Image (cartoon, helix red, strand yellow):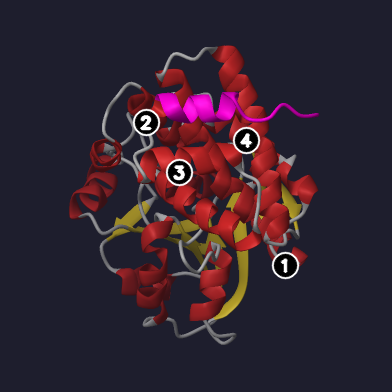
C-alpha cells in the first residue's frame, strides 16, 4: 500500500515512520526544503532527536506525492487545510482514500476537516474519508511507545482498512468508529480546553482547580459535539476524554504549553507566533464561540476564555465571573 503524507511536521513524519515499520511504502511532502533535505540525508527530523527509518522519503513536490499515493494523509494545520486540499485537487487523476490526522474546526463555516473535503473533492476524486485521532504525542510514538487511536469514517470498511494499516503488535493499536463527526469535534475542542488548562497552571491556581476545569471542560465538549450531530459516547472515548487527559496535562502538549505561558503573563499573539508548532486551541476557541452563539449553548469556560484571549477581559475578572456564578446542582 502506497501512502503519501501531505505535511512533514512532527505528526506526519511520525506516522510515516510507523507505516514504514508496518512495511508500507511512504512518501512525505513538505513545503520546507530544509526539512525534506534533513529527512532524506540524515534520516532525522527538526523536532526530534530520534532516527527516522531510512526508507521514509520526503519531497518538495506535491504533484509527486499525489501521483505516488493510493492513500493521502492530511497532516497539515487546519488553518491551511482548505488551501492545501485545493492544491491537491489539481493533481488527482484517480480516486484516493483520504486520512485526516489534523484537529480543528474552521471558523465561520464551522466545518470539520471531513466537511471541507466533501466541499472540495468530487466522488471521482475521493473514494472515502477517515479521521485518525486519539491521545498521541508524536514525541512518544516516534519512540515506539504504546499508543491507542481511533479510525472513524462514515464507511466502516474504510475505517477498518486504516485500522489494519496503522496497527501493529508492538506499539500501535487502532479502534474503529462510524461517528466521524464526533471524533473530529471532540479531538478539536479538547485543544481549547488544554489551552485553558495551561492558563490555569500558569496562574498558579492549583491542581484542584485544574482538575475541575478539565472535568467541566469535558461537559462543554459534549455540548458542542452533540449540537453538531456527534454522539455523546464518542466524547468518553479515545478521541475525547482520552485525548483531553494527555493534552491538558502534559508539557509535550503545544496547547498546554501555550496556555501556561499566557497564564504567566505573556502576550497571546507573541506565544502563538513564537511556537514552533501550530497552537490549534486558539483558533478552536474562536470556532467554539461561534458555535455557542449559533446553537445557544451554555459554555461558560470556553466563552470566558474567548473573552480573555479575543476581547482582552482581565484574567482576574474572568476568574471572578466563573467563581461567582449562581450556585446550582451538578
Q: Earlier in the sequence, mark 3 or mark 2?
A: 3
Q: Earlier in the sequence, mark 1 or mark 3?
A: 1
Question: Which-is-in-front pick, marks 3 and 4?
Answer: 3
Q: CA distance from mark 2 to mark 4?
A: 20 Å
Q: Secondary structure at mark 2?
A: loop
Whole-percent x, y for residue 221 in the image: 65, 44
| Residue identifier under label 1 | 154
Whole-percent x, y for residue 245 in the image: 61, 29
Local crowd size for mark 1, using a 10 Å CA cut-off: few (<14), some (14–19), many (≥20) = some
User: Which residue is found at the position 37% from the left and 83% from the top?
Assistant: 90
User: Which residue is found at the position 38% from the left and 36% from the top?
Assistant: 313
User: Which residue is found at the position 36% from the left and 62% from the top?
Assistant: 80
Q: Where residue 306 is drawn, which disc sits there?
A: 3
Question: Which-is-in-front pick, marks 2 and 4?
Answer: 2
Q: Magenta residues, as a range?
A: 316-330
Q: CA distance from mark 3 to mark 4?
A: 14 Å
Q: Nearer the viewer, residue 87 or 127?
A: 87
Q: CA distance from mark 3 to mark 2?
A: 12 Å
| Residue identifier under label 2 | 314
Q: Where residue 217 is drawn, which disc sits there?
A: 4
- The vertical placement of 68 against 209, above or below, is below
Question: Which-is-in-front pick, marks 1 and 2?
Answer: 2
- The vertical placement of 3 against 207, above or below, is below
Can I make out residue 66 in this image?
A: yes
Amino acid at each position: 500500500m502506497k501512502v503519501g503524507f501531505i505535511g512533514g511536521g512532527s505528526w506526519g513524519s511520525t506516522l510515516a515512520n510507523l507505516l514504514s515499520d508496518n512495511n508500507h511504502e511512504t512518501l512525505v511532502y513538505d513545503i520546507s526544503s530544509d526539512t525534506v533535505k534533513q529527512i532524506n540525508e540524515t534520516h532525522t527530523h527538526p523536532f526530534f532527536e530520534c532516527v527516522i527509518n531510512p526508507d521514509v522519503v520526503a519531497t518538495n513536490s506535491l504533484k509527486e506525492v499525489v501521483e505516488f499515493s493510493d492513500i493521502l494523509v492530511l497532516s497539515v494545520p487546519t488553518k491551511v487545510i482548505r488551501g492545501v486540499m485545493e492544491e491537491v485537487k489539481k493533481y488527482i487523476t484517480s480516486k484516493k482514500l483520504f486520512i485526516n490526522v489534523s484537529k480543528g474546526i474552521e471558523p465561520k463555516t464551522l466545518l470539520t476537516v471531513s466537511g471541507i473535503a466533501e466541499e472540495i473533492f468530487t466522488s471521482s476524486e475521493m473514494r472515502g474519508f477517515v479521521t485518525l485521532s486519539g491521545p498521541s504525542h508524536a514525541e512518544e510514538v516516534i519512540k515506539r511507545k504504546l499508543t491507542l487511536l481511533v479510525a472513524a469514517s462514515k464507511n466502516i470498511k474504510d475505517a477498518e482498512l486504516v485500522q489494519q494499516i496503522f496497527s501493529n503488535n508492538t506499539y500501535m493499536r487502532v479502534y474503529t468508529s462510524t461517528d466521524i463527526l464526533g471524533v473530529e469535534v471532540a479531538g478539536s475542542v479538547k485543544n481549547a480546553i488544554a489551552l485553558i488548562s495551561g492558563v490555569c497552571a500558569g496562574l498558579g491556581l492549583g491542581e484542584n482547580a485544574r482538575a475541575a476545569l478539565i472535568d467541566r471542560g469535558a461537559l462543554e465538549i459534549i455540548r458542542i459535539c452533540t449540537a453538531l450531530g456527534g454522539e455523546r459516547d464518542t466524547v468518553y472515548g479515545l478521541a475525547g476524554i482520552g485525548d483531553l487527559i494527555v493534552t491538558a496535562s502534559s508539557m509535550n502538549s503545544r496547547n498546554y504549553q501555550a496556555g501556561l505561558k499566557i497564564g504567566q503573563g505573556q502576550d497571546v499573539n507573541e506565544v502563538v507566533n513564537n511556537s514552533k508548532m501550530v497552537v490549534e486551541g486558539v483558533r478552536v476557541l474562536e470556532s467554539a464561540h461561534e458555535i455557542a452563539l449559533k446553537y445557544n449553548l451554555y459554555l461558560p469556560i470556553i466563552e470566558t476564555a474567548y473573552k480573555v484571549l479575543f476581547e482582552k477581559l482581565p484574567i482576574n475578572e474572568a476568574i471572578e465571573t466563573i467563581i461567582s456564578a449562581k450556585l446550582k446542582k451538578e
